[in-house]
Image (tube, rainbow, N blue to C red):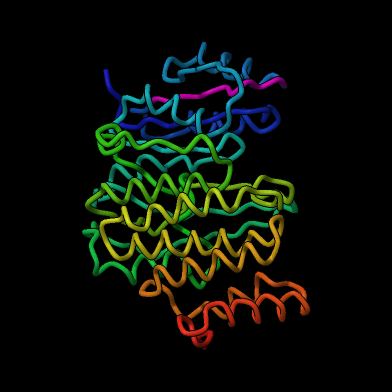
Amino acid sequence: MTSFFSIIIPVYNVAPYLRECLDSVLAQTFTDWECICVDDGSTDGSGEILDEYAAKDKRFVVVHKANAGVSEARNSALRMAKGEWIWFVDSDDRIKSNALERFVRYECKADITYFGMDFIYEDGCRKTVCYKAVGATVIDDTTTAVFANMVKSPMGVDFFGYTWNKFFKNEIIQKNNIVFASNIALWEDALFILHFLNHAQTFAVIGESLYEYKRYTNGLTKRSNKPFYEVGRLFENSISAAKFLPLRKLAYDRAMLCYDCMSRNEGAYNSVKNIVRLYRRYSELANNELRFKVLGACRFAPVRFAVIAYLTLRFWGRIRYFPR
């Protein structure tokens, strides 16, 4: 028997928050769901909490496995998911009690549906962020502006890069074998979404908050030692594979961001070299931002001068000036 929703929760050492997350799933007013929880080698009792909930409600499906990272945990759940729609939920967050029902009643069903979220900070402050509602819209070259507004919104929130603020059509995932890249630990969500959009035909936006996301100062996204180059190349490879202009621009912007961040642990020269190479190769996707990317990657004045002087001489005749 299939479920309308498959909620996927990767779990690793989140015992203090896990019950709150699972209780929010149990509180759903729409009850046709399965919740696949993957215990990724937890050592703090999280696995026992999952077993407790599975014993009480058969809709919880628990998988215990050796630690292999969040991507492989999600991939394991995807191989088991029977629902028509997939929702990825983080184990230390909460979902609104009417979230599933709100989507079921939403008239504009699409292959991927975005929705708003509440950001909850360590000091207790809450920030609700919602994008304006968009009906089922065909993904093609004309939707560039809509995607650009969601990625670079005035609210300062990247609607594109998260998986937990979207409902995915499972048929597309299974048919095209879309999985999370298990060899990276940075922006694997955005890469998954980009691959999904490349096979999807329509998207929609529910203009309401359905998710409560907890923001911590010591989370993964705050660490500075990241494999930016490897991730940047994956996004760069996605540019040519993308079917439509908005997806190519999304992949380009992510690759450029990765190379911009390389200077933190790989030095300014390597960072700027890849920025210039990417700009030269896909200049039609750029927004005349090369000068600012170069200056941003060179965080110290002497380094800025040396790198810019070298690149200006090396690429003179090909790039005669940094765009304004």
Front residue of 281/111: it is 281
> Where is the N terminus found, in terms of image quarters?
top left
Above or below, 217 against 33 in this view is below
What residue sits 66% from the left and 33% below the top?
A: 17
Q: Is residue 38 magenta?
A: yes
Q: Position of residue 248 (x, y in %)?
A: 35, 62
Name the chief secondary structure element in magenta: strand
Location of residue 178 by image quarter: top left
Q: Position of residue 254 (x, y in %)?
A: 49, 59
Front residue of 154/141: it is 141
Above or below, 256 against 24 in this view is below
Q: Position of residue 177 (x, y in %)?
A: 31, 33
Query: Is residue 60 visible to us here?
Result: yes
Location of residue 43 by image quarter: top right
Front residue of 277/24: it is 277
Q: Is residue 35 left or right of residue 41?
A: left
What residue sits 56% from the left and 14% below the top?
A: 51
Q: Is residue 131 magenta?
A: no
What residue sits 38% from the left and 53% below the top?
A: 238
Query: Is residue 210 visible to us here?
Result: no
Image: magenta residue range: 34-43
Front residue of 305/145: it is 305
What residue sits 39% from the left and 59% below the top?
A: 207
Q: Is residue 47 left or right of residue 71?
A: right
Q: Position of residue 135 (x, y in %)?
A: 26, 60
